[in-house]
Amino acid sequence: MYSEKVMKYFKSPKNMGKIKNADGVGKVGNIACGDILVLYIKVIKKNGKEIISNIKVETLGCAAAIATSSMVTELAKGKTLEEAMKISKDIIAKELGGLPPIKLHCSVLAVDALKEAVYDYCTKSSKPVSADLEKDHARIKKEYENVCQRHE
């Protein structure tokens, strides 16, 4: 059973859509359920820090996928890249009042989409990428490619 907040974010998701000329784009998918997310970020420099000034997501998935992807955008908007990278599946689930155990993978997908958008931004702008983010990118990219092959 979904929490009231999950249903609220499912019925009225925030920050849905696409950003033209996004600074970073994260594409993720889950082979088991078929959910796909594309997350877009715009980054500005403010006081010497890189801030996510705008963030949007396109979600093809269940109620939990829509709610978690919407929540990750709310949590990341206005944050520095470093702060945004600290958003976890547990934080998302807690902010939504919990998720059924079978739907926790949706919060992982939302975090992965954000990581991929940051990875894309860093590589496009020749910024250093941490070893952890490189490792996550390799895993996420492989999972996304598997989902895409399944849908061909």
Image (cartoon, helix red, strand yellow):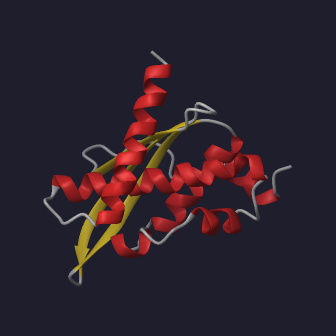
- Residue 41 in view: no
Q: Is residue 16 above or below residue 85?
A: above
Quadrant occupied by the C terminus: top left
Q: Note whether 38 is above or below 56 in the view shown.
A: above
Q: Is residue 129 above or below residue 104?
A: below
Q: Position of residue 45 (x, y in %)?
A: 22, 73
For the view shown, which residue lies furthest in the right direction?
1
x and y percentages locating residue 107 in the rendered image: 61, 54
Q: Is residue 36 left or right of residue 20?
A: right
Q: Residue at x 61, y 35 (%)?
A: 61
Q: Position of residue 11 (x, y in %)?
A: 71, 45
Task: Decide: is 147 above or below 138.
Answer: above
In the rendered structure, the answer to whether residue 118 lies left or right of residue 35 reads left
Q: Residue at x 35, y 56 (%)?
A: 135
The extreme top residue here reads: 152
Residue 17 in view in this figure: yes
Residue 44 screen position, x and y as percent = 25, 68
- Say how many tags the image has: 0
Which residue is at a point 32% across and 71% down the rendered structure image? 51
Near-viewer residue (37 or 134)? 134
Q: Quadrant of residue 34?
A: top right
Classify residue 63 as left or right of residue 40. right
The furthest residue to the bottom: 47
Depth check: 136 or 44 in front?
136
Which residue is drawn at the image coordinates 40% and 31% (left, top)? 145
